[in-house]
Amino acid sequence: MARKVRDLENSGWITNIFVIDDFVYFTDANFNSSYSSLYKISKINLIENLKNKGDFGRKFLANPLIEYSNDAILISQSDVEFVKKEDNYIQNFFKFREKIFISYLIDQKLYTQVFDENKERKNIQVLLNNTNGMVGKVGKEISLYDENLKKLKNYQIDILSCVEFENNFIVLKNNFEVWLCDKEFEDIECIDNTKEFKNIFYLNKNNVLISYKDSKSTIAINIKDKNKLQIIDNFLIRAVLLDDNNLLVKVMYDNNDNINMKSLLKLIY
């Protein structure tokens, strides 16, 4: 069954999306600014607003800072709450073993630390976390880390990103092939051998999203029977599942087919 897609008004300022417990977090991080900010909205509030299919004049996702929009009426109707301003580009925000972590891009390197604690930042890009630990990347080295960012072991793999399923990983390798692997990152099966620049995202327990930059296309592939479903004619920068029915995405191309990092968020449902 084909999915429906709609734009969410006043959301173009949002550049990244994270879900932690009962809240959805946003950032306005962009490479042209020396700082970025973190915001949040209740997941229940967001989903209730999304049930209203009328888009015209919707303001619940407007940026709440006066310095950003300079529109007091718009700000007063926003349901988004400002959390904190940071001096660096916010790249990731996640929870692991009851700790909240934040990652920053600083001088072209990624650093991770416990959020709002005066602890050492470590040069680690966290790709995902599970019951065993956090899978992190430093340069081309992939390792497993604990909640104190202590390295537990190395993996002999070369990947850009990965998505976890029940008993397996889907990994995006440096040559842009997509592979099904076991939990030790041993190859099982090639899912996509094209060398086009792409992103991968979790969709549900059976399906992974593969988004193609040059083709401007995103599909869902069932990892069990390999059936494919066209999702959207665009390249996804971010994709976050809010619940079983709502996928919130940030696309690279606007409705005029131009690269536009201020494109509105889209709801796929």
Image: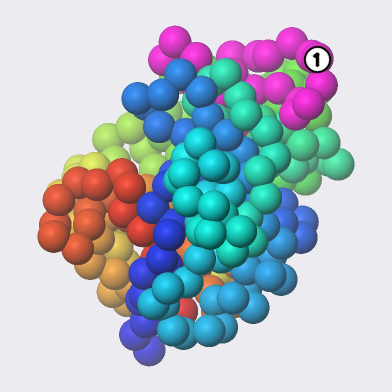
Residue in the foreground of this view, choosing between 87 and 267 = 87
Task: Give the x, y percent position of residue 12.
Answer: 39, 53
Query: Going by the picture, which residue comes out furthest to the right?
Result: 98
Dividing the image into 4 quarters, which one contains the N terminus?
Answer: bottom left
Residue in the foreground of this view, choosing between 75 and 194 = 75
Asked where in the image residue 123 lies, by quadrant, the reply is top right
The amino acid marked with disc number 1 is: Asn
Residue at figure coordinates x 45%, y 46% from the top left: 69
Task: Give the x, y percent position of residue 178.
Answer: 36, 49
Task: Give the x, y percent position of residue 76.
Answer: 61, 59
**Secondary structure category for the residue under label 1:** loop
Q: Which residues are magenta?
A: 104-128
Label 1: few (<14), some (14–19) or many (≥20) C-alpha neighbours in 10 Å? few
Q: Is residue 59 at all visible to an observer of this figure?
A: yes
Which residue bears the numbered disc 1? Answer: 118
Residue in the foreground of this view, choosing between 22 and 227 = 22
Residue in the foreground of this view, choosing between 24 and 180 = 24
Is residue 144 in the magenta section? Answer: no
Residue at figure coordinates x 65%, y 14% from the top left: 122
Q: Is residue 147 above or below residue 9?
A: above
Task: Give the x, y percent position of residue 269.
Answer: 46, 79
Is residue 105 in the magenta section? Answer: yes
